[in-house]
Image: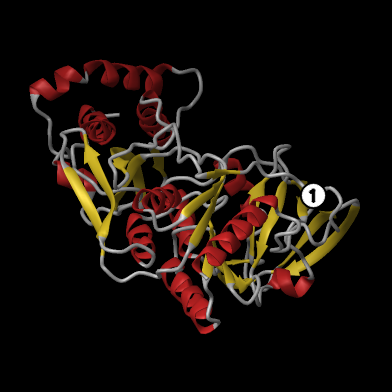
Amino acid sequence: MSRKTITICIAIVTAFLLVLFTADITLRLSEDNTAKAFGLWSNTSSAYEERYTRLDQVYSILTERYYKEVDEETLLLGAINGMTASLDDPYTMYFTGEEMRELNTTRSGEYVGIGVMVRILDDGYIYIARVFGNSPAQEAGLRKGDIIMASDGLELKAYTSSELTEAVSHIKGLENSYVNLTIKRGEELFDCSVMRAAVVQNRTEYLMLDDKIAYVSLSEFFGTAVQDVKNALDYIKENDAQALIFDLRNNTGGLLDQCVDITDMFLPESVIVYTQDRSGEKVYYYSDASSLDLPMAVLVNGNTASASEIFAAAVQDTGVGTIVGTTTFGKGIVQTIYPFNEDGAALQLTTSQYYTPSGRTIHKTGVTPDVEVEYQQNETADPASVFEILPETDNQLKAAYEYLLVELNKAE
């Protein structure tokens, strides 16, 4: 390995140490090649080399003296991951090109799979939180609440988001190929063969709970979420809804621009959120004067995070709705994605903190609901109905529903 090659490798690694850009909240893609923007590729000054001599020495010893052949790309990736890990920030991480492509596919909502949204149970098993309409899963008879025990004989368990991504990769596959799933439904265990197909994920569900109160749920602020919510609001207007339950339980967040666009539909003219970076620079995001203007209850829980907390906090601070459920996750910091265009890799970096319209920070504390209701499993309900949208089987939904009935009675 030549000195020039080693120096270039070190330059690649140390590029990550010098990120000084000001950025927006959650996930924003930089249009420039990050390493090129920092101008580090040709930096071979003596001061630069002196600073990173030890890294150079360790790299040389590992590649030349280790008792087994060393993969240089693995060493480089390990150095990068070591730097991000040293920040002790679970939201700052490096994605390889392959990982980034998979992530973008998931976030776009367009992929080849069976058409379900999955979540993790406390015991690590994966359950179906939602079956998309006109999907292979719906055609195969899979239901919300089914637990996916195995895929093609491989047991599926996950305790972290990365493990869930790995598990889901065993369900996805080539279009028109089949996956054999082992499903647990209540006490019943059975196999189900599902043909994979192109799926477009709709991130909303909506219906009228009665002739007055509408229900809308949003699972993520990604993909077609803005249009999906517009369609939901058109539906409830067409049905002359007088009040709305907006369900953000288990919504783990998404993109700032989508969060702002969606929150703007519900708020009058006001601040939605503002961010502040380490230099003290603040960036404000506003809503215009138009709004839904209906009594609203927003359902939240401990898995309501990031962008969904921005929505909930803005509703709470501006008084346009009441928050019902349990305290939210408490992720009030901002990530920006810096892409490396030559191979599609990217660095996701925490760059600032966000604040609610009243100036609150909710990081590590969350949004405290106005009406606190712990979720209780209805043990007497029909297992098939537990996963339906019914106030009778969901005590948090029932609390929101009853709250809005009272509010509507006051207005009469």
Answer few, some or many: residues within 10 Å of disc 1's Cα (few below 14, many 20 plus, some between 14 and 19): few
In the current view of this chain or complex, which residue is farthest to the right? 188
Q: Kindly identify the residue that appears in the image at 35 percent across and 69 percent down.
A: 291
Q: Nearer the viewer, residue 292 or 406?
A: 406
Looking at the rendered structure, the kind of residue marked 1 is Asn
133 displayed left or right of 366: right
Up the image or down, 58 lies above or below 137; here it is: above
Asked whether residue 151 appears in the rendered view, the answer is no
Q: Quadrant of residue 53?
A: top left
In the current view of this chain or complex, which residue is farthest to the bottom? 238
Up the image or down, 216 lies above or below 134; here it is: above
Q: Kindly identify the residue that appears in the image at 29 percent across and 32 percent down.
A: 13
Q: Secondary structure at mark 1?
A: loop
* Place of residue 84 in the rendered image (x, y in percent of width and height, measured from the top left): 37, 30
Q: Kindly identify the residue that appears in the image at 84 percent across and 55 percent down.
A: 381
Figure colour scheme: secondary structure
110 displayed left or right of 336: right
Quarter of the image where the N terminus is located: top left
Up the image or down, 411 lies above or below 42; here it is: below
371 displayed left or right of 310: right
Where does label 1 land, which residue? Answer: 378
* Place of residue 310 in the rendered image (x, y in percent of width and height, measured from the top left): 38, 49
Q: Nearer the viewer, residue 230 or 114?
A: 230
Q: Nearer the viewer, residue 104 or 333?
A: 333
* Place of residue 344 in the rendered image (x, y in percent of width and height, measured from the top left): 36, 53
Circle count = 1
Asked whether residue 310 appears in the rendered view, the answer is yes
* Place of residue 259 in the rendered image (x, y in percent of width and height, measured from the top left): 38, 58
Up the image or down, 224 lies above or below 67; here it is: below
